[in-house]
Each structure stands twice: as structure tokens, then as C-alpha cells.
Image: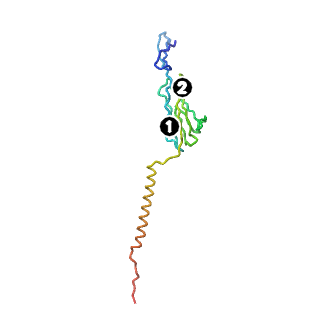
Amino acid sequence: MIAPTPEPHPLDSVYTIAASQIAYSMSRYSISVVAPSTPICKIVGVAEYGQNINLTCFSEKGTPKPIYKWQSHDVNNLPRANPPKTTDQNGILSLYNISKDTSGFYICTSTNEIRSAKCNLTLAVMQPSMNMASTFGILGAVAAAVIILGVIIFFCCCRKKNKPEEYAMGYVD
């Protein structure tokens, strides 16, 4: 016999099951069924050309444990298949060697026996960027090389000019 008992959320239910065992004794088991909460979607990694990134999806609530499925849409919001080598496991969509074609909309659906919930991500893959530290590092190295080269050339030229002239020793008539 299954009899639902009230819970705070209208889609969540607790069922009490009375089961008779072989020895004709009664036991009570309680099963909790909770709809998945709206999942949290995140981009893990840097969305730049050639990078590998993960799109993660996780519902904080859900009993039984929700199953996650990702869907991909291009920048014109047309459904498309995931790129080759893409993996979709346990709410983690792994994208490899991303490019402009990887840009678009990604929808994660978290589903259990009660209902499903969704979250959306917009992925915009950008050109690799150089941060300020690496730019200044490169400029500093080039400036140091030019200064060192200038010092070497200066000393080589000055050394020849400041040398006293050598005259052949001989008799003057």
C-alpha cells in the first residue's frame, strides 16, 4: 500500500510503503522523491580559439539523482550536433580545440522521474588575447636587447678610435 504524505514543495513527495516480510511482520520504508532544482551552468576554462573547455551543469536538489543532457544551438539558434570528440558525461560537456564554429547557445536539461529543469549558456569563442604583463615583458626584453647591442657597438667603435697610432720605427734621414 502506498500513501503519500505532504511535503513543503508541491512537486516533492514522500511515500510510505508498508511491506510484509516472509515472517509476516510489518516494516515501514520511507522513500523521498524530489524534483530537480534549476541547474547551475558554468563555463570552466578560457573561451579562446584552440582551447579545451568544460560546460558544467548541476542541480543542487533532486531525488532520485537527476540525469543531465546538453543540447547545442548555433549563433542563429538552430539546433546542431555536438562537434567531434565532444563528451557529455554527468552534466559535464567537454569541448576540445574550440573555434568560432563552437560559439552558440548551450542548454542543459536536468531530469528525474518528477520533472525536468533547464539552464542556458551563451558561448562566444574569442581570439587569443595577450594580457598586459606579457606585452610589457616582450617590450622590455626587446628594449634590453637593443640597449646591450648599442653598448657593444659603442665600445667596439670607441676602442678603435682611442688606440694610439703605431709608427714604424726607423731612421730618419
Label 1 crowd bin: few (<14), some (14–19), many (20+), radius 10 Å: some
Give me the disc on residue 43: 1
Quarter where residue 157 is shown: bottom left
Screen quadrant of the C terminus: bottom left
Residue hosting label 2: 116
Seen at 52% across and 36% down, the residue is 55
Seen at 40% across and 81% down, the residue is 167
Seen at 47% across and 20% down, the residue is 9
Q: Nearer the viewer, residue 138 or 84?
A: 138
Q: Amino acid at mark 2?
A: Ser
Q: Secondary structure at mark 1?
A: strand
Residue 61 horizontal/vertical position (percent): 47, 26
Residue 145 horizontal/vertical position (percent): 44, 59
Q: Nearer the viewer, residue 98 or 9?
A: 9
Residue 44 horizontal/vertical position (percent): 49, 38
**Protein image colouring:** rainbow
Q: Nearer the viewer, residue 152 or 124?
A: 124
* Residue 32, placed above or below residue 132: above
In the picture, measured across the screen, residue 105 lies left or right of residue 28, that is right
Q: Which of the two labelled residues, at mark 1 and mark 2, occupies the earlier sequence position?
A: 1
Q: Secondary structure at mark 2?
A: strand
Residue 6 horizontal/vertical position (percent): 47, 16
Label 2 crowd bin: few (<14), some (14–19), many (20+), radius 10 Å: some
Residue sitting at the far front:
76
Disc 1 and disc 2 in contact, CB within 8 angstroms: no
Q: Amino acid at mark 1?
A: Ile
Give me the disc on residue 106: none
* Residue 26, placed above or below residue 124: above
